[in-house]
Image (cartoon, coloured by chain):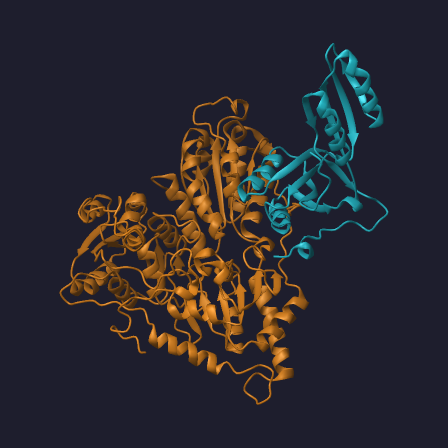
Amino acid sequence: MNSTLEPKYHILAVLVENKFGVLTRVSGLFARRGFNIVSLAVSPTEDENYSRMTIVVDAESAPLEQVTKQLNKLIPVIKIQELSSDQAVERELMLVTVKSSAEARSQITELAAIFEARIEYVGYDAITILAAGRPEKLDAMSDLLTPFGIVELQRTGRIALPKLGRRPARLRAVKDQNR
Amino acid sequence: MKLTGAQALIKSLELENTEVMFGLPGGAILPVYDPLIDSSIRHILVRHEQGAGHMAEGYAHATGRPGVAMVTSGPGATNIVTPLCDAYMDSIPLVVVTGQVPYSVIGTDAFQECDTVGITMPVTKHNWLITDAQDIPRVVREAFHVATSGRPGPVLIDIPKDIAMQEMNWYWPEAVDLPGYKPTTEGHPKQIKDAARLMGEAKRPIIYAGGGILKARAAEALRELAEMTGIPVVTTLMARGAFPDDHDLCLGMPGMHGNYTAVTAMQESDLLIALGSRFDDRVTGKIDGFAPEAKIIHVDIDPAEIGKVRRPDVPIVGDCRLVIEEMIKAVRSDQDKNGNGKKAGSRWPTLDPWRAHLREYQERYPLVYEQFDDGPLKPQFCIDQLNALTPDDTIVASGVGQHQMWASQRWTFNHPYTWVNSGGLGTMGFAVPAAIGAKVGKPERMVWAVDGDGCFQMTAQELVTAASERIPVKIAILNNAYLGMVRQWQEMFYEERYSEVYLSPDLPDYVMWAEAMGCVGFRVDSPEDVGPTIEKANEVDDRPVVIDFRTDYREKVYPMVAVGTANSEVIVDPDTERLGGKS
């Protein structure tokens, strides 16, 4: 599991009305059009009338242009931005529980320190660690933890915001698409 | 002013100029049916909720105004899902109101509860569950706006019983505020100029007119564009009537059962001007082999249609009428500058050779059939007779299958909004209720449904509705005792292994059935009775008429492009040459 952000993924920041059923509309659209979601994170924004969805789309399942055009047809969808790595700050959160005998414990805590992760819980034979960062960093960390024995792992999926101060990242769907 | 939610709903529908609605009451929608008694809105009580939906569609097809239907929760709502999906596929504006169990018990599996909003989400342009009676006027305004603007489509309002009984302070919103919904209607001027330039260079251009022409009320603009450029026009199944069939430039219907000339003209063209059409698989055949040399101008109000199937050279997002009107100006100024093909040296090439080439195809590959005097009765003959013996502006509805293709191929549609059919979804049983809805919307016009025996049996009970409401529609059943199109496929592609397609010509007895439903029933077995019986049916204007035409089950729909093959492999009737095709 050593995937960096390859162009086979697209990150969409989707501003939607904060109403019930909107998530169903979006996920239902993806399902019936055969678009695959890699990850999805939703939360209200600074304006409580709107929520922001950060959707990572499998670029091979459908042309991005169709995904964004179909999304735009949903009435509660206000705005869609495609975010590329250099134009956006993206972060992800990971909770991971690793098997940890007394002997392994110090190695694991050392590893956690290298990744600036926090130990959230220590049991007799397991440790739960919280890590945050770019998706590649979390990939690397979970790879290094694998030999110890990962009991459970949960990631939030990416959240992303465009970098300020640059020109606004705009939808590049039409230009990118070569069919 | 205090109103109940139900009163507010009916009042809002009135303010949206609803003159008629189609529906059937039940438990959860009871409160809304009460104020309907005092309303100016005419309500037509259907016999099955699917009928209400298709009637609303027929009404919208014929009038261009949104069709309105109202049904109860649970089974009422699920029964109207087919019409919603049909309207979604064919971009028909519908506003459907469904009752829902009281808001307080939603999620408890209450009697006649179903997740209507969830079920209809994929088949509506948008839908709303009302959670506060105060929202009703706003939601109704939004619903009509969404249904009728942009790419039209069906919408649904789900109203829980307790919300319908709740009191609210009446208001009427002045405007609709939907920040996420701003359809683009005006085409980009540069793209329009580019389109005009391409038109001026093409030697074998074709206008590929789709249902969007009718939705945008763009038939007149289309005619002007075609006439000023001399570009021939094909009209898809959804666009029959958008350009007059008796016009010199009209090539008729393309696609799987399109005529040879329309199919081949698109195939050989060097420029396809797609106006409100969506490159449906039934039109394109195998997409890789479709119109290989054509550049594409694609005009559509739905940006998602552009590039979905075939990447255009000139994409234009906008309303067909507005865009075509701008195109006309752009063409005119280009022709003024560069000549219009009549002068030597003009940039606009003369299209005479192209049109002459297509005329040769028309002569060589006409649509053919052979009616012997002593029978059996040919379905094409029945349609030709109907076409000949009815007024020019007759509205024709059809179901789905062979009869639909024959009707679309053979009828001379010279006026827009005279062809009512189910294109995208292919809903059998569409014809009877859709014809009723069309007649309600256009009572002064003659309305005929051309139906199949299989289709008729699906929704025939709505003739009871028509009889009791005195809606004098006329139904021609082309009764070949088979699910004819399926039979045709089994004959051609399944080695004549006929699986579950035989229906019997006599069971049911269509004449007795028609009369039991309060209609006039006729049966026609022989060719010489066809004309006189149609004339008798035309005389009936106080109740519906049904004619049971006993037609030849062996007759197949030609031409045909088999599934998975390219349009260049179109199969014409094997008897074409013998029956008048000039080689």
From the top left corner, tell me how far across and down residue B12 is, in percent. 54, 42
B126 on left or right of B261: right
Residue A75 higher or lower than B186, as above or below: above
Quarter-of-image position of residue B142: top right
Specify whether residue B96 is in view: yes
Number of numbered discs overlaid on the protein picture = 0
Q: Nearer the viewer, residue B24 or B212?
A: B212
From the top left corner, tell me how far across and down residue B564 is, in percent. 42, 56
From the top left corner, tell me how far across and down residue B37 is, in percent. 43, 38
Q: Nearer the viewer, residue B39 or B90?
A: B90
Of the 4 image quadrants, the one containing the N terminus of chain B is top right
Of the 4 image quadrants, the one containing the C terminus of chain B is bottom left
The hue used for chain B is orange
> Which residue is pictured at 57% across the width and 62% down the height?
B299
Residue B476 higher or lower than A134, as above or below: below
The hue used for chain A is cyan
Which residue is farthest right? A165
Quarter-of-image position of residue B465: top left
